[in-house]
Every structure is written in C-alpha cells, then in structure tokens.
Image (cartoon, helix red, strand yellow):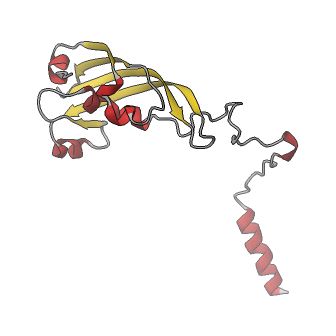
Amino acid sequence: MHLSPYQLARENRTLTLDVPLDALPRFASLVAAEGEAVRVEVQFDRDEQGRCHMHGRLRTRQRFLCANCREVEACDMDVEVDACLLSSDDAARELLGEVDPLVIEGPEATPAQLFEDDLLLALPERPCYGSEACPHRVQMPEDELPEQQRDNPFAVLAELKDGSRRRDD
C-alpha cells in the first residue's frame, strides 16, 4: 500500500483508513498475539510556508507482553500524529526545533514510513502497569508510604552558617 502525502496535502484531504499490522512490520513484531488493524485519521495540508503537514490520530487495541510479569495484556493506544513532511535530511536539520520533521523521499510513502515511528514511541513500557492482575506491580501499604519531606532551599545556607559558628568557637 502506497500513499501520496504531498498530493493529499495539496488537496487538503483527510485520510481515514485501517492499516493492517502486516503493513507495519516493526510494530507488528512487538504485538504478542494476532492484533487489530490501526485506525488512521490524519489531515494532510500545507502550513504557512507551504510545507506538507500531517496531523491527526492513530488508534488501535493490541496485546503486548508485560516485561514484569510475562503476561499478555490488552492495551488501547490513542496516538497523536503531528509532523511536517520534508524531502531531505538537510531540510529536516534546518527546521529542527520548529517542527517535528519526517523525511519522506519521493512522492509516495508507505503507512510504515508515515506512522510506524509514532506508534513505536507510544508503546507502553509496562502494559499491565497498575493492573490488579500483575503480581509484580509495586504497591506499598499506606502505613509504609514515605512521608513527604519538603525541601527547604535555605537548608544549605543554614548548614554553612552553623559550620562557620563551630569554627569560630
């Protein structure tokens, strides 16, 4: 499957489609079981400088292996996409800090080129984090919670002052 992001931007179009996991091989390799397609809802347009811009959301529900408990846990993902498509690394370096650059060489791109990095960056570190089912979740009894200790920004000055008094004595 190939998409034409620059043409979509010229036409100010919204792309809505379901991308199968086999079109996203790096992401699919991290899914623990047969997964669902990724729902793409992305608007392509031109920014004030005429650059191709895409913004929208990627949504999916996948099952991932928890590194803590080794259980497979379902996880809903709702990923925001916001990038400026550029044709070269040099152009991307020039705009670094202004926009989130995505280098696409040529007039067409695959869904993996356009969306896979955003999905990978949004992967949960621990899919079962906070789940009652995870036997390795960290939970302290309330009576063992550490007391909040407020930092006093002048504590260092007080220590210095006390230290100088001892030397004077």
> Which residue extends farthest front?
34
Query: In the rendered view, would you say 151 is above or below 4?
Result: below
Left or right: 35, with 5 as reference point: right
Identify the residue at horizontal 30%, vertical 39% (top origin): 98
Q: Is residue 22 left or right of residue 32?
A: left
Q: How many marks?
A: 0
Left/right placement of residue 64 relative to residue 17 reads right
Q: Quadrant of residue 36?
A: top left
Q: Nearer the viewer, residue 34 or 90?
A: 34
As drawn, which residue projects farthest toward the right?
143
Looking at the image, residue 68 lies above or below residue 21? below
Comparing 41 with 61, the one in front is: 61
- Check the picture and name the quadrant holding the N terminus: top left
Q: Quadrant of residue 120?
A: top left
Which quadrant: the C terminus? bottom right
Residue 37 position, x and y percent, is 38, 19
2 displayed left or right of 39: left
**Which residue is located at x 57 percent, y 34 percent?**
127
Outermost residue toward the left?
106
Query: Measuring 28% from the left and 30% from the top, which residue is drawn there?
Result: 112
Q: Horizontal and vertical percent for residue 44?
A: 25, 19
Across and down, in percent, residue 164 comes to 76, 80
Judging depth in this view, the residue of 97 and 159 nearest the camera is: 97
Q: List x then y, in percent, for residue 34.
A: 44, 24
